[in-house]
Image (cartoon, coloured by chain):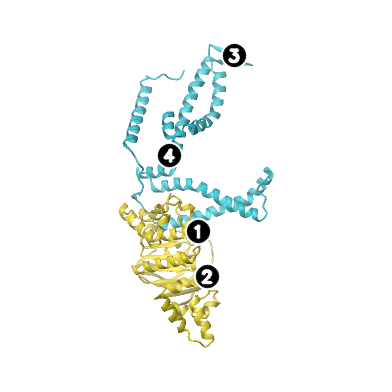
Amino acid sequence: MLQLSGVSYRYAGYSNEVLHDIDLRLDDGEIIGLVGPNEAGKSTLCLVASGLAPASIGGSLRGSLTLDGVPAAGLATHKLAERVVIGFQNPNTQRSGIAATVFEEIALGPMNLGLPVAETVERTRAAIARLRLDDLIRRDPQRLSGGQAQLVGIASLLAMQPRHVILDEPTAQLDPAGTRLVGEALRALATTGTSLLIAEHKTDLLDGLCSRIIAIDGGRIILDGPTATVFDDPRLAALGVEPPARARLVRALGNRGLEGSIVEDAIAGAAS
Amino acid sequence: MLPAAVIAGVAGRLVRISALLTLPIAISVILVSVFTRAGTHVLFTIGPFDATTEGVDFAGQTLVRLFAISTSIGLFGLTTEPRSFVLDLERRGLSPRFAFVALATLEAVPAMVERANIIASAQRARGLDTEGSVRARLRGLLPLAGPVVLSSLTEVEERSLALEVRAFGKPGRRELLWRMPDSTAQLAVRAILVLALIAAIGGRITNTFPRLP
């Protein structure tokens, strides 16, 4: 379990806090979606939840982050990495810059953990299979498209097999097929007990993936609840967050006096 | 050295590179040695300077040594992939941090060139003149240098965070996936070279080989 309790955070060199009194509990196997307008504090919350802020980037934190009951404060970054990982929005900065092939790039994390070669290879192959990257394994990581680089970046994190995964807009550069692929991989990951916090503008992805949605604005939690409840909440639009197509359709039908459950049934039927 | 270069298929490039590496020093060595070295046999005179046989002999020996050094460096550079070299050093005990710094530096150059080209294209699209006369190029340099340097610095910060996430800071050795192919023939050649080095040092200590005059 990853838990933030009463967390407020201020970047180094700034006088104002950008997160205010955040309480967040991420249970094992749970997927939480994080939405909000630009500059709402989503990326900062991701950094704090990963332990990198303030451990690596400085700043000051009030409140606490605990990982499986262990306070993150004081943990060395490599100890943090064994428990929680974070994927950044820009896949180019996720890349190590020292690997000659995609396979080596994905294997870098497990290798850094000091695992035996056989286990490193096994984890790498599993991550490659999960994101169907077999065709790319011999490619130079610097010569990938944005979408491919994003998939490789996510695979690099999956190969670490962490207990908790934080993703900051993991599908920003992906096409619909790539987005679906990532969604499937993350859903499968959650079934192994890994918890996920995903900051994402693509609410359609979150709608099918998350059990809970948190909406933040101005560094504060504005909405927090089951996915359907938050996405159906009219206050979401005021935050500049576009609800998923399902929620918009249900609302449009409701406005015309039609039963929204038709859509829910249709979606359930299509999914089955 | 040259037979090795021929076997590696880089003889032509090696001679070219070695000549280029040696040339600037060679010119000064020739001028200084031939015309200023004291000697009894004067070959010809230019103004107040005498070219002596002893000077030519000294310059020749120095040039041979310079060429030997430059071909060694050149052959190493042409036949050894820097990345493989650094990773093999790590396997032999080099700190992973040092290996990363060395590798990242090597990889950073083409990445920066690529970024500079992208930024140059973007600036050109906004009307910046980056081609033409030297003056025009210099004028266009500043709007390019700023974004290239700043974006590189930002990327370095994010990349260091991404590496930390992947446990790069974990102390101790890591089991590398890569192993350089090392055939029996290569091992034998290395052993012979080490023996030759020991013999050369021994020969110099015991004065078996002639010194430069």
| Chain drawn yellow in the picture | A
Q: Amino acid at mark 4?
A: Thr
The verdict on a common chain for dots 4 and 2 is no
Q: Is residue B78 above or below residue A177?
A: above
Q: Earlier in the sequence, mark 4 or mark 3?
A: 3
Asked which quadrant contains residue A121, the reply is bottom left
Mark toward the viewer: 4 or 3: 4
Circle 1 residue: A146
- Residue A195 image offset from top left, x and y in percent: 38, 68
Disc 3 crowd, CA 10 A, few/some/many (<14, 14-19, 20+): few
Q: Secondary structure at mark 1?
A: helix
Q: Amino acid at mark 1?
A: Gly
A94 and B149: which is toward the camera: A94
**Cα distance between the residues tagged 1 and 4:** 31 Å
- Residue A106 image offset from top left, x and y in percent: 40, 56
**Cα distance between the residues tagged 1 and 3:** 69 Å
**Cα distance between the residues tagged 3 and 2:** 84 Å
Which chain hosts label 1?
Answer: A
| Chain drawn cyan in the picture | B
The verdict on a common chain for dots 4 and 3 is yes
Asked which quadrant contains residue A78, the reply is bottom left
Circle 3 residue: B44
Q: Amino acid at mark 3?
A: Phe
Q: Which mark is residue A40?
A: 2
Q: Is residue A272 above or below residue B113?
A: below
Q: Are marks 3 and 2 in contact (CB under 8 Å)?
A: no
Circle 4 residue: B80
The verdict on a common chain for dots 1 and 2 is yes
Which chain hosts label 3?
Answer: B
Residue at the (48%, 52%) spot, across then down: A142
Q: Amino acid at mark 2?
A: Ala
